[in-house]
Amino acid sequence: MPYSTVVVGTDGSGTAEVAVKHAGKLAADHGARLVIVTAYEAQGGDEPVTRSPAVLGDSKWTVTDRSQAEEKARYGSALATELGATSIVAQAVSGTPPDVLLETAVDFDADVIVVGSKGLTGASRFVLGSVASAVSHHAPCDVLIVRTAD
């Protein structure tokens, strides 16, 4: 069964770039709409940013500015275009990466969410889980986990 809407997230990391390229090729092959989303956690005032356990250990790639998030989503769009994707929506959404991916999948009636296999590393990956794990357990559609680590 062909996919008509593919959702992928990017945070600017190398592993996210692998997932975006895979999603771009998948969208091109299926003639599908590709939705590229970057989650950001806006920091305002003195309130601390709360993070879900899925992203606690991976704060290196936490995006905290909407314009920065939009830039990362546009870069993902350019990568996907190079691979032949033609119908692309790129957006920035406030929230944690798993929540944003899941909400985007519902909002766009996605057939598949593409996520990278690497996020957290070492022992924290087993204790805290990962974006891929959180998405795969709650997705309203298929989930394609792309191997993004050697």
Image (tube, rainbow, N blue to C red):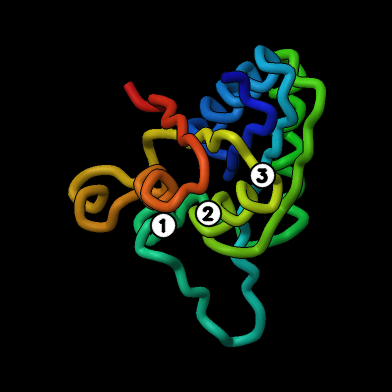
Q: Is residue 144 left or right of residue 101?
A: left
| Front-most of residues 2 and 124 | 2
Whether 123 is drawn above or below 144: the answer is below
Q: Position of residue 120 (x, y in %)?
A: 33, 46
> Comparing marks 3 and 2, which lies closer to the viewer?
3
Kindly identify the amino acid type of the residue bearing the numbered disc 1: Val
Find the distance from the CA under tag 2 to the CA under tag 1: 8 Å
Kindly identify the amino acid type of the residue bearing the numbered disc 3: Asp
Find the distance from the CA under tag 1 to the CA under tag 3: 25 Å
Q: Is residue 128 left or right of residue 83?
A: left
Find the distance from the CA under tag 3 to the CA under tag 2: 18 Å
Residue that numbered label 3 is attached to: 109
Mark 3: secondary structure: loop
Mark 1: secondary structure: loop
**Crowding at mark 1 (Cα within 10 Å: few <14, some 14-19, many 20+):** many
Q: Sequence order check: which comes first, mark 1 or mark 3?
A: 1
**Crowding at mark 2 (Cα within 10 Å: few <14, some 14-19, many 20+):** many
Mark 2: secondary structure: helix
| Front-most of residues 80 and 47 | 80
Q: Residue at x 51, y 41 (%)?
A: 141
Q: Position of residue 130 (x, y in %)?
A: 35, 49
Residue that numbered label 1 is attached to: 55
- The residue most toward the front is 1
Residue that numbered label 2 is attached to: 97
Q: How many marks?
A: 3
Q: Residue at x 60, y 26 (%)?
A: 23
Q: Sequence order check: which comes first, mark 3 or mark 2?
A: 2
Q: Is mark 3 in CB contact (under 8 Å) with mark 2?
A: no
